Image (tube, grey):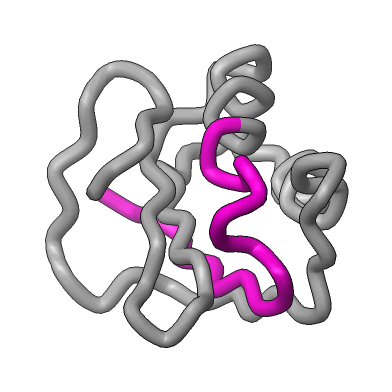
Amino acid sequence: MDCLKFIVKGKVQGVWYRKYTSINFNKHNIIGYVKNLPNGDVEVVVKKDKDTDIQKIFEILREGSPKSEVKEIIMGECDEEIEFGNRFEVRY
């Protein structure tokens, strides 16, 4: 199973970034998860298939929540096997 991992940098913790990402990804039927990292970044992992709209993912991640300030988004392939649910979720 292929997946993409995004590291989002900036003011993205304590500003409802994960919740907004989850709501918007679920509206677009994107499967995966979002979680805070100890260094202040946010990790977003998305299940990748032939219909994955990477531009839409970047658009949602850049928009964030009203109080967030996204400075940088780094995209890469997942380097481990990821267990996905059937929707996009917030993980802790």
Q: Measured along the vertical axis of the image, is residue 41 above or below residue 1?
A: below
The x and y percentages for residue 49 are: 47, 39
Measuring from the top left, give residue 53's x and y in whole percent.
Answer: 71, 39
Of all residues shown, which one is farthest toward the front? Answer: 14
> Looking at the picture, how far across and down is residue 8, in whole percent?
62, 70
Is 63 in the magenta? no
Magenta-tinted stretch: 1-19
* Labels in figure, total: 0
Answer with left or right where residue 83 lies relative to residue 70. left
- Residue sitting at x 54%, y 73%: 7
Residue farthest to the bottom? 39
Q: Residue at x 60, y 74 (%)?
A: 75
In this view, 46 is above or below 10: above
Residue 27 image point, x, y percent: 65, 13
In the image, taking residue 61 as reference, residue 91 lies left or right, namely left
Q: Nearer the viewer, residue 77 or 88?
A: 88
Which of the 4 quarters of the picture holds residue 70? bottom right
Q: Nearer the viewer, residue 31 or 70?
A: 70
Hey, which quadrant is residue 5 in on the image? bottom left
41 displayed left or right of 1: right
Queried whether the magenta region covers residue 10, the answer comes back as: yes
- Is the residue 59 above or below the residue 89 in the image? below
State the residue at coordinates (34%, 54%). Answer: 2
